[in-house]
Amino acid sequence: MAVSGRGPRERMVFGAAQLIRRDGVTATGMRDVAAHARAPRGSLQHYFPGGKEQLVNEAVAWAGAYAGKRVARFVGELSEPSPSGLFAAMVRQWTDEFETAGFVAGCPVAAATVDCADSSDSVRAAAAAAFAHWSSAVAQALEGMGVPGPRARALATLMISSLEGAILMARTERDVRALTTVARELGPLLDAWVIPSSE
Amino acid sequence: MAVSGRGPRERMVFGAAQLIRRDGVTATGMRDVAAHARAPRGSLQHYFPGGKEQLVNEAVAWAGAYAGKRVARFVGELSEPSPSGLFAAMVRQWTDEFETAGFVAGCPVAAATVDCADSSDSVRAAAAAAFAHWSSAVAQALEGMGVPGPRARALATLMISSLEGAILMARTERDVRALTTVARELGPLLDAWVIPSSE
DNA sequence: CTACTACTATGACAGGTGTCATAGCGGACG
DNA sequence: CGTCCGCTATGACACCTGTCATAGTAGTAG
């Protein structure tokens, strides 16, 4: 599980996200982050003068940007794009990870929310921004499939909510059942709003 | 926010659940729990010889039982029972709390999952049991409304997943928007499987 | 050469953690 | 009375936390 990447700074942000989504924010120590990123401990106070809060903020922001990019990639990979197809791809990313890597880690944004929503307002805001980024990527993709704007935003919220909840249930049960169930049950509803664009 | 209740033991379990759902498991200290429950610190090792793990387990179990009971009560309070009506009631419980008490705390089972799913197998199992209890209460209610057994279980998973995810989003955004959106969008889907029982 | 900057190294600090050992209280029971 | 038991009280333990101060090491530019 060595963390590879460009500079040490990038590795630390990435590694922090990895540890956070596995153990939660509070249980993730700064020393752990440095060690996990194979970065010197002294670099922490150099790159992150704002301390742990800054590091967590950046890790959450990174996760949000990553989720957004993944959505765009999923859309591009779909042979014939549909809302249910996109949702299935998002779900499959998690079932794949759980089945190959084990039910070790969840979503870092969820972890940040649970651990910091009440204790650190800046982390809470970073999590909100991450959700917003992710959500607007999904909504934009849905609009591209013919879903009217307002409904696209509503469906994006529904998709992300169900996905996050299903991730939680899957981790406790050590079973992808909740994820597949959610994808199957939600599929028809998601496609019901598509306005045929051509043919 | 004084914790009232029967015995000190009960108060500690309840208080632990309250603190956990606000700050997460790791950030919740044993001394905090005792103080919050107005219970003597020495009672901790007396009532919970299994240490923090036992306390967390019991808090999560309590939350699961509580959620199950709430579902039964919601069903009883509905004038004309329907799946969407039940889901709306479950969602409303959270919007009400958020609007009156602020976006201070989330779901203790979600917190336990995020913080302990990988570090403590017993807590993970307790969270799974809590979800199962809650889920079967919902499924049973749906069956009573005419939803066939297997689909009732699937819809229960979908309802709880979306609710949990929406709670996360609502806390980060400090806005009940995600919750109301999910309730509105999911409603029609939930009622589509009802088999008219009479009239 | 000096001087400066980017980065690293390390030890210490105050504070908090869960856990444990030990002792004390107060009432019930024989 | 003494004895037991449920419960409480308290201080100590080893450990870990985030943060800071301080010094040291390239490497590069003037």
Image (cartoon, coloured by chain):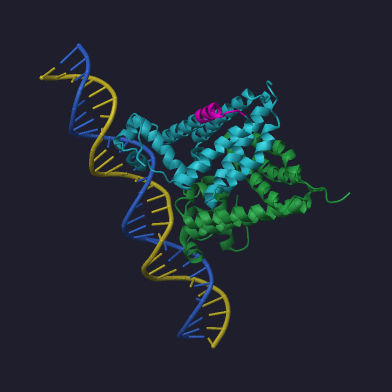
Chain colours: A green, B cyan, C blue, D yellow
Nearest the viewer among A171 and B198 is: B198
Q: Is residue A162 left or right of residue B64?
A: right
Q: Quadrant of residue C21?
A: top left
Residue B50 visible at all: yes
Q: Residue B188's spot in the image, x, y percent?
A: 68, 37
Q: Nearer the viewer, residue A60 or B50?
A: A60
- Tag count: 0
Counting from the top left corner in percent of width and height, residue B101 is at: 44, 45
Q: Where residue A96 sits in the image (x, y, percent)?
A: 69, 42
Would you say B25 lies left or right of A142 here? left
Q: Residue placed farthest to the right in the image? A: A199
Q: Residue at x 49, y 45 (%)?
A: B98
Residue B160, given in percent of the width and then of the height, sits at 59, 36
Q: Quadrant of residue D2?
A: top left
Q: Main secondary structure of the magenta part?
A: helix
Identify which residue, A197 or B56, lies in the foreground.
Answer: A197
Q: Residue at x 44, y 41 (%)?
A: B20
Instruction: Give the quadrant of residue A98.
Output: top right
Residue B48 in sight in this render: no
Q: Is residue D25 left or right of residue D8?
A: right
Residue B14 covered by magenta stretch: no
Q: Is residue B115 above or below residue A65?
A: above
Bounds of the magenta span? B68-81
